[in-house]
Image (spheres, rainbow, N blue to C red):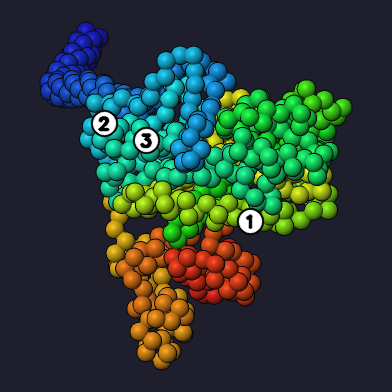
Amino acid sequence: MSHDQSEFRARMDYFCVFSRCSFLSCRIRQIKRPKMRVLNRLSSLVLIILVASVLLILMNVVVLHKIWQEQVNLREGPMKMLLAPAPPIDDINLNIDSKNDVNPNINGDAKIDSPQRQIVANLPLNPITNVKSGPTLWIHAKQLESGYLKHVFNVFESLGFATNGGENNWDVLWSHEYPFEELDHVIRRMKPGQKVNHFPGSGYITNKVSLATSEFKFVPKAFKLPEGKTKFQNYIKRFPNKLWVQKSNNHRGIRILAPNELDLSKEGTFVQEYISDPLLIDGHKFDIGVYAVLTSINPIRAYVVETEALFRFCPVKYYPFDASNVDKYVVGDIYTALWKIPTFYKLYKQRGFTFKESFNYYLKSQGQSPKEFWDKLKMAIASVYIEKEKFLIQANSHFKSSRNFFELVRFDFVLDKDFNIYLMEANMSPNLSSRTHEENARLYEHVIFNILSVVGIASRAALNFPNIVLDDDNMEVSDADINVFSDRCMAPECKSSNCTLWKCRLCNYCMTPREKLIAKMAYLEHINRGNTRRILPPVADTAEELAILTQTQISQESEENKFMSLWFLGQCQRDATWCH
């Protein structure tokens, strides 16, 4: 083959290859082009879906924000007024009206005087909360915006209560003042499940003149003026070296005076012996506040907060003594807190003890038994309730039922150097503001919660409080739960006695409907008592001790209290936790 032919053939081969490749490329492009169109369409669809998703998310965020804002308004609306800036709580003076000593349940009313106009602050109804979804609290108090009842709000809100109740919309009424005058028209039309935080006639307990002149051994000797002027003059002739203070119901202006400096003609006052050898800790005189709650009268039931107490120390050391400096011997509104006293600083601040645990440690260091010490205080409080019950029953007779009421009281004690106790006063609507001592917030909310537990408000809030009927088959307590003395009830003498013998009266088949209701309420208080402990009916460490104590006291009790004491004894014999 010639050179020209070879070159021509090579060119033709190249052309064929090129043509074939071009043909294949075209075919490939023709094949790939439809697939690219599909991919482009899928990409567009994905992009559209992503954009739509983002828009939906944004719309959901807006809707959720609106819902959240409504919930905030629902929950915090009433608190805006509560937490708003206001005059200091120290500007509020608590005075007790004592113009009419004939009716102590009126004399004990706490009234707040202020230079500003007094307005009873009932929180406004939030339109969003018109649809009721849970129990409602109505707080009736003056100068509510100052925040002195903040901890009451906190506890009730944590229990799921709406805190915007009013005269026509409430399940629990918490009144800082004695409510049975201003709110009498509301309280008289109460429904069975509603609760009020005061008993009619509670002034018989909290009125300072009435308590001081009650002749209890644990209350310093006192004489009401001017009626007791002659008795007082005769008394000081026999005890010329005793020191005295002159007091009124408002607990203001207390000062040690010589007998010739006392105004024995001043109405509405009384003179009381001063405990001149007080127990001092790190040089400071102090008092102890014990929180108690009365849950029932006729029969009487009462409890104390077992796990905590309030300790207040005078701001100035007692010695060198100077009667003109009341900060040395009078515990006032401005006091020194327990954790600022050197003996207790490490126990409370570093060891994490409670106030009461810190004091118990001190008692042990002084060779004292904490149990015996606190038992003395409990017995003193129980004695006051027993003595005043007859007046409370009379005051409550004007209402359909006393089961709507409960009463929180703080009993204040001082000690002498030998650890003897002296009850100085009982406070209706005790201070629950931690404004001056922030660390008391824990104490106050602890007290409020446990008080609400034992009276059935905290424990039953989730069970559609207050619409609970204690019928035979109630899931909380039934007739079977209140049965006591089972062996005795099977004896022939009980079956044949027609329920006339006391030993048979507590058999289930002998109880009247009212007695069954009383027993069921006592049962619920016990299982819901939290950190409170019963002081009435009587308590003891064992069933044997309680049996002796009950038999000793039962002859002096009313029929209702006798029934209640024996019922608790029966429960105690089944379960030792019921003994105390």
Which corner quadrant of the image does residue 345 belong to? top right
Find numbered disc 1 in the image and state the secondary structure of the residue it sits on.
helix
- The N terminus, quarter of image: top left
Tell me: 224 left or right of 391: right
* Circle 1 Cα neighbour tier, 10 Å, few/some/many (<14 / 14–19 / ≥20): some
Give how far across and how far down residue 500 sits, in percent: 39, 81
140 or 9, nearer to the observer: 140
Vertical relation: 308 (above or below) 570: above
Identified at 65% across, 50% down, the residue is 215
* Circle 3 Cα neighbour tier, 10 Å, few/some/many (<14 / 14–19 / ≥20): few
Callout 1 amino acid: Met
Numbered disc in front, either 2 or 1: 1
- Residue 73 makes an appearance in the image: yes
In this figure, which residue is indicated by the disc labeled 1? 379
Tell me: 512 left or right of 279: left
Numbered disc in front, either 2 or 3: 3
Alpha-carbon distance for marks 2 and 1? 46 Å
Alpha-carbon distance for marks 2 and 3? 29 Å
**Of callouts 2 and 1, the N-terminal one:** 2
Give how far across and how far down residue 335 sits, in percent: 68, 28
- Residue 378 makes an appearance in the image: no
Identified at 68% across, 55% down, the residue is 376
Identified at 30% across, 55% down, the residue is 468
* Circle 2 Cα neighbour tier, 10 Å, few/some/many (<14 / 14–19 / ≥20): some
Numbered tag placed on residue 181 in the rendering: 3
Callout 2 amino acid: Thr
**Of callouts 3 and 1, the N-terminal one:** 3
Find numbered disc 2 in the image and state the secondary structure of the residue it sits on.
helix
In this figure, which residue is indicated by the disc labeled 2? 129
Vertical relation: 520 (above or below) 280: below
